[in-house]
């Protein structure tokens, strides 16, 4: 059982020694569940951070995401990073350019970059599809990893890349490599909580593994919600609600005194 939150130095020291677990969580309930389940790393929206988050998840290493497009200049990213770190983040996810990564690192902000399929930049690699399936494409990923390392990043998410390619790259870099659909040759396995919980009603990515069926439970709860609302409406119309137990009592003498005065 974990008793303290790991540091960047701890994660780098664990590289190649064991597989870390990572989830994208977006609610305090998911963060608390990740803590209690022994998840090592979480990606979070910055707005989730704060005292309540750290009370729910005191020992998970948290990557608040500085979402691409929400910030423009390096100074914008820097301000966002400082806010996130002060609110309880341990490192920041940043898909901005190398100059921004370098700027953050200069101020001591631990940065996680992104290579392979990068959703915000997927038009450059052919859309939402695997990346690195040719030697040329794989070399480009390797060059991007090297560039992130030189810019001062300490980690990189590598998304939807052949496992053999991701493993070869991970073995040749000091970056902590976070695999989303890129095999076990990396340092951590990363999934979205909503996929693990089966909350989606549409397409699941190839790399996702569904462990529960929350969508069906949500549908059941919605039917229960409708039924409860209907019963409430029927009770109001029939006079069954409110009953005496739902109301505040008043002493008869006080009621009589009020009625005398209000009629006067």
Image (cartoon, helix red, strand yellow):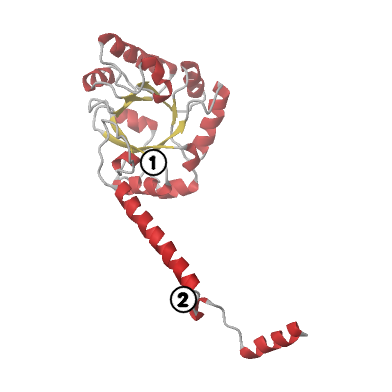
Instruction: Return the x and y of residue 234 as percentages of the image width and height.
Output: 45, 69
Which residue is pictured at 73% across the width and 88% down the height?
260
User: Taking the image as drawn, is residue 3 in sight?
Assistant: no
Going by the image, does 161 lie left or right of 234? left
Q: Give the secondary structure at mark 2.
A: loop
The residue under label 2 is: 240
The residue under label 1 is: 25
Q: Are marks 2 and 1 in contact (CB under 8 Å)?
A: no
Pick the front one: 20 or 249: 249
How crowded is the residue under tag 2: few (<14 C-alpha within 10 Å), some, or many (20+)?
few
Going by the image, does 221 lie left or right of 256? left
Q: Is residue 200 above or below residue 77?
A: below
Based on the displayed image, in which of its 4 quarters is residue 148 positioned?
A: top left
Going by the image, does 148 lie left or right of 38? right
Q: Which quadrant does the C terminus fall into?
A: bottom right
Q: Give the secondary structure at mark 1.
A: loop
Q: Is residue 56 above or below residue 125?
A: below
User: Taking the image as drawn, is residue 190 in sight?
Assistant: yes
Which residue is pictured at 33% across the width and 31% down the height?
11
Going by the image, does 210 lie left or right of 47? left
Pick the front one: 201 or 82: 201
Based on the displayed image, in which of its 4 quarters is residue 13 positioned?
A: top left
Q: Which mark is residue 149?
A: none
Instruction: Return the x and y of residue 150 as percentages of the image width and height.
Output: 41, 15
């Amino acid at each position: 059982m974990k008793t303290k939150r790991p540091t960047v130095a701890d994660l780098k020291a664990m590289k190649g020694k064991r597989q870390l677990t990572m989830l994208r969580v977006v609610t305090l309930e998911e963060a608390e569940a990740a803590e209690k389940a022994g998840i090592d790393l979480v990606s979070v929206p910055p707005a989730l951070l704060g005292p309540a988050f750290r009370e729910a998840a005191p020992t998970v290493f948290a990557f608040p995401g500085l979402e691409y497009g929400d910030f423009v200049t390096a100074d914008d990213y820097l301000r966002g990073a400082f806010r996130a770190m002060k609110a309880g983040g341990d490192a920041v996810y940043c898909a901005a350019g190398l100059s921004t990564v370098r700027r953050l690192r200069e101020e001591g902000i631990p940065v996680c970059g992104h290579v392979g399929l990068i959703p915000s930049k997927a038009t450059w690699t052919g859309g939402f599809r695997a990346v690195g399936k040719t030697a040329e494409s794989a070399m480009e990923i390797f060059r991007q990893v090297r560039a992130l390392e030189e810019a001062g990043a300490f980690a990189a998410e590598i998304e939807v890349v052949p496992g053999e390619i991701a493993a070869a790259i991970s073995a040749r870099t000091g970056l902590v490599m976070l695999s989303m659909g890129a095999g076990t040759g990396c340092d951590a396995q990363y999934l979205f909580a909503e996929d693990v919980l089966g909350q989606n009603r549409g397409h699941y990515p190839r790399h996702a593994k569904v462990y529960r069926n929350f969508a069906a439970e949500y549908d059941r709860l919605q039917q229960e919600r409708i039924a409860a609302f209907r019963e409430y409406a029927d009770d109001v119309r029939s006079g069954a609600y409110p009953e005496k137990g739902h109301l505040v009592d008043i002493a008869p003498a006080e009621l009589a005194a009020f009625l005398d005065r209000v009629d006067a």
